[in-house]
Amino acid sequence: MVEYLVNSCGFSPSEAAKFSKPLAHLRSTEKPDAVLNFMRSQGFDGAGIRKLISLNPNYLCVNVEKKLAPKFQFLRDLGLSESDIVDAILKNHGILHVNVQRSIVPKLEMWESLLGSRELVLNHLKKKGWFFSSSVEKTLHPNLKFLRDECGIPEERVSVVLRSHPQLISRKPESLRALVARADELGMPRQSRMFVRTLDALFMVSKERFEAKVELMRSFGWSESEFSSVVRKVPTFLCVSLDMMRRKMEFLSI
């Protein structure tokens, strides 16, 4: 298998030695040959194939007719081009593991209802590596229920933010609760239309970066309550880089 991975896929000997271990049970190259031929016929180049195998060498053991071909056909039926399908699978390679009807279709339908269009769903699928990895039952539904029932935020308001940052509800439920607690600490009313946007801004700023920005503004004479007040009015204030924030404050202080 080491020799096969070097000659057929273009891996270096050291890489091939590493990725061959899960394939040690194979007694012929029949399945790997079928997989490689199929992937090449679907537009995957050598680099794309090597990336997939490095993510999971067992892809070389998958049954092409029963497992791979139906996934590619399903993605084609959605309207994705050959290059789009390659991008989507390289970003969301877990698609190759799961059942179309039991896993992919429910996620597709849920995201379509949340984002409002299939086009947006497919755009995220091609560009974001986590997009189809979150469980509908364990993650998406519980997070939406929490925001709706416990936080009092209408689903339509959540959907507006999800169109640009769908990862907000793809995080673990306990992480989303922690994010809501951070927004509460800022004094942002949950009924405010800015609450979800505050969650979105906090999602992109770690606690450490948040504290660094508080300290920076404190050095320019701001109180913590003044900082919180600005964030409540303009949540994207948090997304300004620390360096940019410093340079603008220094300019304004001249």
Image (cartoon, helix red, strand yellow):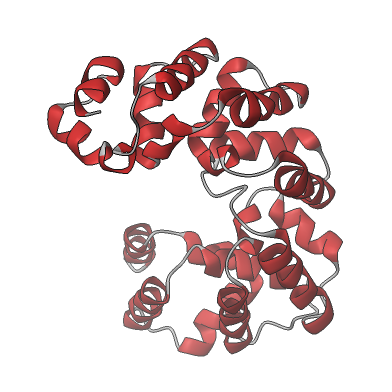
**Is residue 7 something that shows in the picture?**
yes
Name the outermost residue toward the front.
27
Quarter of the figure that contains the N terminus: top left
Left or right: 63 with respect to 164?
left
Q: Position of residue 101 (x, y in %)?
A: 77, 42
- Depth check, front residue: 138 or 249: 138
Q: Residue at x 71, y 43 (%)?
A: 104
Q: Position of residue 111 (x, y in %)?
A: 76, 49
Q: What is the quadrant of residue 240 in the picture?
A: bottom left
Q: Residue at x 37, y 66 (%)?
A: 249
Is 112 placed above or below 63 here? below
Q: Position of residue 66 (x, y in %)?
A: 65, 29
Is 118 placed above or below 200 here? above
Q: Position of residue 243 (x, y in %)?
A: 31, 59
Q: Residue at x 75, y 48 (%)?
A: 102
Is 63 placed above or below 38 here? below
Q: What is the quadrant of residue 236 in the picture?
A: bottom right
Q: What is the quadrant of residue 241 in the picture?
A: bottom left
- Depth check, front residue: 94 or 233: 94
**Is residue 194 something that shows in the picture?**
no
Name the outermost residue toward the top.
41
Quarter of the figure that contains the C terminus: bottom left
- Depth check, front residue: 100 or 161: 100
- Depth check, front residue: 205 or 13: 13
Total numbered labels placed on residues in the image: 0
Q: Residue at x 60, y 85 (%)?
A: 181
